[in-house]
Image (cartoon, helix red, strand yellow):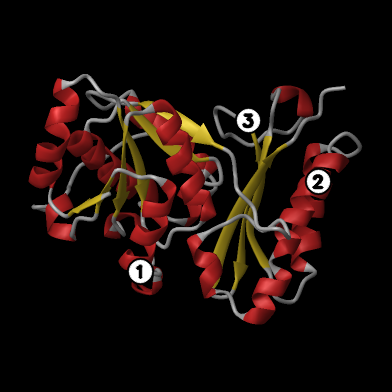
Amino acid sequence: MLIVHTATELRRLLHPAREQKKTIGLVPTMGALHCGHLSLVRACREHCSITVVSIFVNPTQFNNPNDLRNYPRDLKHDCDMLLATGADIVFAPDEKEIYPKPDTRRFYFGQLETGMEGAHRPGHFNGVAQVVSRLFDIVQPAYACFGEKDFQQLAIIRALTEQTDRAPKIIACPIVREADGLAMSSRNTLLSTSQRAHAPLIAATLMQAQAKAKELTVNTLRQWVIDTINADRELEVEYAEIVHERTLQPIEQWREAARPRLCVAVYARPVRLIDNICLRVES
């Protein structure tokens, strides 16, 4: 496995593979890797001859300076994990390499970006689009892998490919969970012992909501999710929305979506956790 820090060096390394018509795949990450990230690497390897994993904590997608400052970073540990998983190249640039000059581009994703994360994290998805489009340009992959845990981000990335030259095919990978159900996240390491003990209630509530979807109306189920999580002293719901799986717009009736998605953001102060589940309500 090779570790490179500049776009020039990465392009030089990938040139022989392109000449040999090998398929190049990309797994974009912000580091602090866990088994969820490694599942993306394995999925990429199934489709591609060369797997590039980028590690870059992108400042333009953080609207909270403290969140950026506290985001966990451990490049050596990340590289050890990637070596064991079979990644071919790690691209670990610094900020000036990704943004040699200020990135003033503005992307528009319409209704996909107006709710949920977009409503609570102004500018977040524009920052995501900036860095992902830069990585697409540098790596020029045939495939790129993203996790379903960031479900709204996945929809944004798919929309981005319609606005980007040489866009890769997007591979969506399922959420990977801890043994107690908590969705794997780099931010889980920031939880206190008490918070970590309480956090699995988020996933447990979503699983119960999946079963209750056939019994309750959309709005009743949504409120039940909020009340159930908020009843825990360590947790506070920022939002809970039941949305159309493609438009990401809130629904009022189950018949409005074949596979509605329940998405939540929950604070275990100051750590912010997100999760989602597909609600199957068909008989």
Q: Residue at x 56, y 34 (%)?
A: 248
Q: In which quarter of the image is the C terminus?
A: top right
For residue 174, the mark is: none
Q: What residue type is labelled 1?
A: Asp
Task: Single out the mark in the foreground, 2 or 1.
Answer: 1
Give how far apart the Cα atoms at labels 2 and 3 are. 16 Å
**Residue furthest to the bottom:** 193
Number of other residues with Cα within 10 Å of mark 2, as a class: few under 14, some 14 to 19, many 20 or more: many
The residue that mark 3 highlights is 244
For residue 209, the mark is: 2
Give how far apart the Cα atoms at labels 3 and 1 are. 37 Å
Where residue 76 appears, as percent x and y from the top left, is 32, 66
Q: Which of marks 3 and 1 is nearer the N terminus?
A: 1
Nearest the eye: 247 or 10: 10
When the figure is inspected, residue 274 is found, relative to residue 194, above or below; the finding is above
Task: Single out the mark in the foreground, 3 or 1.
Answer: 1
Nearest the eye: 265 or 111: 265
Q: Which residue is drawn at 18% across and 38% down?
A: 138
Number of other residues with Cα within 10 Å of mark 1, as a class: few under 14, some 14 to 19, many 20 or more: few
Q: Which amino acid does label 2 sit on?
A: Ala
Circle 1 SS class: loop
